[in-house]
Amino acid sequence: MIAAGDRYEITEADSQVMSDWVASGGHLVISVGAQRASWLKSPMAEWVPVRAAADRQMSDSDLRGLEALAVGSQRIPFQGRVRGTELELSDGRTSVPSLTGPLVGVSAYGFGRVTMLSVDIDRDPLVRWAALPRLVERLVEGAEPVEAVIGGDGASSTRTRGGGALSHSGISDLKTQLHGVQDEFEQVSRWRSGRCWCW
């Protein structure tokens, strides 16, 4: 995971190594937030498919999606506005939406993926948040936010938005389960097996 604390200082050679690693199946998680100007100077900004398009101001209500992703009852200790980055996803998906745009964007890069967070995890208000370690863990796992669901009998449970985990329904259903939880990106086509007869 890369955050703004290091000002995204990386050499061209190291950036290429990182690009090759992600393209071969790695998962890079980046937090840009208010440090968009520093990010744009980094050689990584040239190849990362999620773009830091503009600066933006976010309210405390915009950050609620991060609380859902962290799967905790602890609120982010913050009221007011925080500087962040507007994410632009040409062929990715929004993992955590907000009223003012994506908080977390995910895009394919080769066989891997890049996840970008639009707020700083190493600055206020997130740095003081007790659930921050869980948020980082869930970002690295590529998990989806969890919603509370109230059943007809009044009992509450949780479910993930989008993908989920494998269920224990037996080995014969493994292909279907894997298909259901894998990442989907429109620009990445699946190889399909079959026979073609030409005359």
Image (spheres, rainbow, N blue to C red):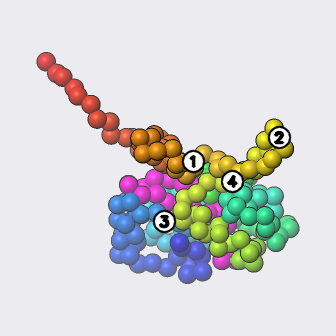
**Range of residues picked out in magenta:** 105-123
What residue is disc 1 on? 163
- Res 153 label: 2
Query: What residue is rendered at 16% in x and 21% in y?
Result: 198
N-terminal of the pair, mark 1 or mark 3, is: 3
The one of 141 and 119 positioned closer to us in this rendering: 141
Question: Which amino acid, by three-letter code, is at mark 1?
Answer: Gly
Question: Which amino acid, by three-letter code, is at mark 3?
Answer: Leu
Query: What residue is rendered at 66% in x and 54% in y?
Result: 145
Real-space CA distance between mark 4 and mark 3, rounded to the nearest whole angstrom:
22 Å
The one of 127 and 59 positioned closer to us in this rendering: 127
Question: Which amino acid, by three-letter code, is at mark 4?
Answer: Val
* Side (left or right) of 3 relative to 63: left
N-terminal of the pair, mark 4 or mark 1, is: 4
N-terminal of the pair, mark 4 or mark 2, is: 4
The one of 124 and 77 positioned closer to us in this rendering: 77
> Circle 1: is it few (<14), some (14-19), or many (20+) Cα within 10 Å?
some
Q: Nearer the viewer, mark 4 or mark 2?
A: 2
The one of 32 and 133 positioned closer to us in this rendering: 133
Query: What residue is rendered at 64% in x and 62% in y?
Result: 118
N-terminal of the pair, mark 2 or mark 3, is: 3
What residue is disc 3 on? 28
**Which type of secondary structure does the marked residue at label 1 adopt?**
loop
Vertical order, 176 against 168 (above or below): above
Residue 99 horizontal/vertical position (percent): 75, 50
Real-space CA distance between mark 1 and mark 2, rounded to the nearest whole angstrom:
25 Å
- Res 146 label: 4
Question: Which amino acid, by three-letter code, is at mark 2?
Answer: Asp
